Amino acid sequence: MQNKVKWTISILLVFIAILFLAIPKLIGIVIHDAIADQVFGQINTSTEGQITITDPQLETGWFRSKIQFNIVISDTQNRVEPYYLLFQGIISHGPILFAPSEFALGLVSIHVTVNADKLESKVATITTDDMETSVVVKFDQSLSIRAKVKNISIRNSEENLYTTIDDLDAYMDIKEDLSARADIKSSKILIQNNQSDIRLTASDPSLHLETAKLDDFSAASAIEVKIPSTVASEPLSFNVSNAILEWRSYSSNKSAELTDFSQYMQAKKIESNLPLESFIWKSEMRGVTEELIRSYNEMLFNIQSASSIDPILRMAELTQIANKTGLLLLQNEINFTNIIEANFYQGMHKLDVNVLWGGLPALPSIDSLMFKDAAEALNVEVNLLLDQESVSLSPFAELAELYSSQNYLMSSNDELTLDAKLTKGIVTLNGESFPLDQLLQ
């Protein structure tokens, strides 16, 4: 009995060993066939000759393969010389992947060095150092990509605006369910205007992107930008420390068919000739429908995309899409909040705005919108708090005194406050109510 168990274990171990030896070769054969028969041909066909593969070389080994080819990017109107990219790389066959910077398990990993030529267009000239790129495909078909380039230089066609990006490092992870995240960072970004000698330098900027589904605009997603230091030279001359921008979208608590958006912006310390020393801006939009999001994205896409049709027809098309988006916005119930805190003229000030648009679902068109109906659907609450001593030292001192004498601003505990509400066409200002029509007269 023991001998049978030993034989079974031995056979199983031999089978596993053979399997581990055979799998890399099988993966290599599949990769060779896929690249040679499909990838290169599809690139040439799908780009209608604007991007072509030349001098392809693919050597398939047992555990790894070597690949080399040129990509030629051409201008269809032959306005500039073709742009050449030389790809040289190693493909590691799974299940054990020996990537240059890491050890991993998966189907395949690719490490490619891209030798880039100078890219010239009508807009700018781009020059880059060699780019190191690694791609790892894991057993669950998730994908991770890392790209590094030492320096990127961009000079506009008139050569008066010059931008450099140093030590660019980008990482992207895509899961099988198409959820994805990306992290991009750089040691320095320099923007220089050669005509005015203005230099803007951002040190150690980073960008984080995240989405629950790449192919769904309404899926939960997030963007975060951090810039520890931003310095501008004369004549602008400012230094901003710890700048942060966060943007998020997520399913509403009211319904899974609705989406909420939030934004957070901060500049913790500002040194400049201006009286603004810091600020925080928080905003949120709740209850946006998927139809409104799709229409808004369609409008942005049409604005940004080039078109060869007649400009008048183009403007008519954009106007139609904008009217559609505007109508959906008017029909949609939305809650919008804004909170701004700023250190201005050596004093802290705060503005809190809460807007509830009740929506007009029965509105047939934008042209049918009536002022009375809009006033009934709109609810607004505004709370303003100003540091009184700070305002007295600012150029707005006389204006603040005028508003205080008219009871628009109330003085209390060394602060100036304003409390205003609009509900169903009735305005309440610091406790006093009157119809909105009276305020507009």
Image (tube, grey):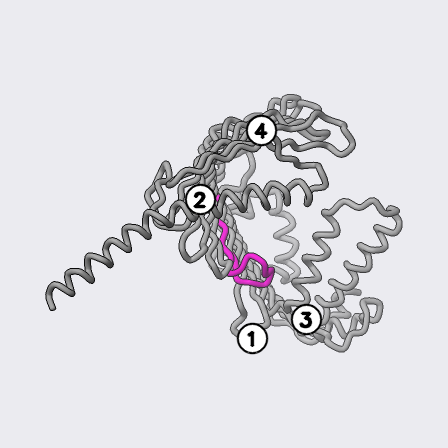
Which mark is first along the chain, 4 or 1? Answer: 4
- Identify the residue under disc 1: 255
Disc 2 and disc 1 in contact, CB within 8 angstroms? no
Q: Reply above or below: 45 against 341.
A: above
In this rendering, the label closer to the viewer, 4 or 2: 2
Q: Give the range drawn in magenta.
A: 207-221
- Identify the residue under disc 4: 163
The spot of residue 259 in percent (x, y) is 58, 67
| 421 inside magenta stretch | no
Query: Hey, what amino acid is under mark 2?
Result: Gly
Query: Hey, what amino acid is under mark 3?
Result: Asn
Q: Distance between the residues labelled 1 and 3?
A: 14 Å
Which mark is first along the chain, 3 or 2? Answer: 2
Neighbourhood count class around disc 2 (C-alpha, 10 Å): few under 14, some 14–19, many 20 upward? many
Query: Hey, what amino acid is under mark 4?
Result: Thr
- Identify the residue under disc 3: 332
SS state under label 4:
strand
| 209 inside magenta stretch | yes
Which mark is first along the chain, 4 or 3? Answer: 4
Which is more toward the observer, 168 or 388?
A: 168
The number of callouts visible is: 4
User: Does residue 222 appear in this view?
Assistant: yes
37 displayed left or right of 120: left
SS state under label 1:
loop
User: Does residue 169 appear in this view?
Assistant: no
Which is more toward the observer, 385 or 239?
A: 239
